[in-house]
Amino acid sequence: MTRTTPPLRAAACAAAAALLLATACSPGGTPPDDDSSSTSSTADPTDPAADPAGLETFYDQELAFGPCEDYGTTPTHQEAVDAAVATSAAECARATVPLDYDDPGGETAEIAVIRIPARGGDPIGSLLTNPGGPGGSGVYSGALTAQTLAASPVTERFDLIGFDPRGVGRSTPAIDCHTDAEADDGSYPLSAIMLASEFTAQDTAAIFERCAELSGGEQALQAMGTRDAARDMDVLRAALGDERLTYLGQSYGTRLGAVYAEQFPQRVRAMVLDGAADPTQSTYERRVAAYTGFQRAFEEMAAFCAEQGDCPLGDDPAGAVAAFHDLARPLAENPVPAGESDEFAVGFDEAVNGVTAGLYAFDAWPAIIEGLRELQQGRGDILTLLTFSFGQRDAGGTWPNFAEANYAINCRDEVRMTPEEVAALREEIYDVAPLYDPGVDLSDGARDTCEAWPQQPDLGFPHAVGIEGLPELLVVSITGDATTPHAGGIALADVLGASLLTVEGEQHTITTQGNQPCVDDAVARYLIDLTVPEEGASCGIEPVPTAAPAAPPAGG
């Protein structure tokens, strides 16, 4: 994995400025009154060969694969793409899809695609992948996966396909809401729920209007939901020549995969869903569960820190949150500098962001500890680097549009919340995850920053429930996952009737890491031979040398 900042195995789960699973819904949220949780596809899901009526032009297109110049969204992304071209004969193309599937003769969108051809002489077909987010670049992660799985039977038998979902990365129109400078200084935060910020109705309207202006207009911005992205995947499946879809999705990618399965159950060959959220929970419930997971991971990190000696959180893990607050809360009024020229300021939000970024994987815990020790000395360089690495900021200051896409896609998916519901959610999160409590009353400024969106969300909760005609799928879930707790993986496997592979360890997603034989073998057997692990199967995460390639970004 080519990076200029410290690598994090889980680099894409939420907007880097806020480190949230930027989603929102009311407690016990239900689908909109128009039953928009059901698919609007005109395809016959029982006939894998049938093109949906009115969409034949899109389904019958031939992708013109060629050079991959300018398919990376930052210089670092492009370096990874160039490496995949040099070492794996990667090639790139753009697929055309309707911007609005209800108006296939109207405006179109372009989906950026990278293909790494199968190494062997007997390819099975294409393996579509999604790294998470929403907002993670599949072109970038596909290029990285070509390296981490370079010797895998999976890349021997499948053409590896990474794609930037609509609105993401090099797909067009791309979601754009702020400048790189604003991302650097945190002056334009994007998340559905801000835990330590205050907003007015005018603020939320201004966010929507600016995103719409910079993203190609209101119509384009409102066409960025998961249901349309899943339909794009079906167009890609057909354009790549596959009768049925073989798919590997991580974190948010499990949502995308589950929605595809819901819309096109008879077109699924196999799916690996790694790091899953529970599709039966409201977003309110899932958010509380996620922050409970972050708090648990923080407490585990604090215990690890105490064992090392000279821990900046003290030698009693029970006092770790109070010790962190002693360090971080004063930063709200008196931030500390970071960067070679002290160009960045680390306040309470930035300190929490850096710590949370490191909680995604055990091997980043030492960096959190050093970052907290540095805070004691009046500096915030390490925590800033953790946040920048999480958001995939390039060393030259270029950000991908991950945070903006994360915000917009979730606004398109999720049920809105009232200010009272947001305030109640904040209080519950502070209760289950006191790490995030800034220690000040922000209830007057609690708002859903998606409230100004004029179009109702259409994902629906619950979703992917009661699907008929699916083959057996494979869910992979890690017991110590900080952001998509193991209970969510168990629930998704139950809902889909899928096989569950449990992995004992502390990190978020694992299937593209390429250095865990137990997991790698189980995934390869399933994808190639459609053989699922035995009931109750489990793996442990094995230590790997520090020089081993890092896994592609993945998130929730």
Image (spheres, rainbow, N blue to C red):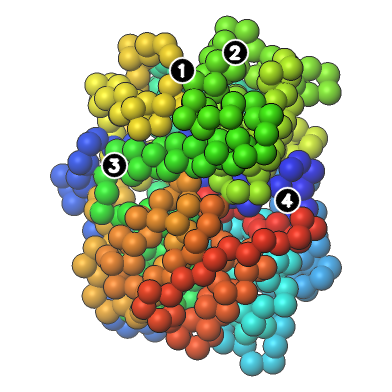
Amino acid under disc 4: His
| Separation of residues labelled 3 and 1 (CA atoms) | 22 Å
SS state under label 2: helix
* Residue depicted at 69% across the width and 14% down the height: 336
| Separation of residues labelled 4 and 3 (CA atoms) | 34 Å
| Separation of residues labelled 1 and 2 (CA atoms) | 10 Å
10 Å neighbourhood of mark 2: few (<14), some, or many (≥20)?
Answer: many
N-terminal label among 1 and 2: 2
Q: Quadrant of residue 426?
A: top left
Amino acid under disc 2: Leu
Amino acid under disc 3: Glu
N-terminal label among 3 and 1: 3
SS state under label 3: helix
Residue at the spot of label 4: 77
Which sits in the foreground, 194 or 215?
194
Q: Are marks 1 and 4 in contact (CB under 8 Å)?
A: no
SS state under label 4: helix
Q: Is residue 136 above or below residue 89?
A: above
10 Å neighbourhood of mark 4: few (<14), some, or many (≥20)?
Answer: many
Residue at the spot of label 1: 438
Q: Where is residue 534 shown, x and y percent of the image?
A: 40, 81
N-terminal label among 4 and 2: 4
Q: Where is residue 437 shown, x and y percent of the image?
A: 43, 21
**Disc sitting over residue 331 in the figure:** 2
| Separation of residues labelled 4 and 2 (CA atoms) | 33 Å
- 94 to the left or right of 380: left
Q: Is residue 269 above or below residue 198?
A: below
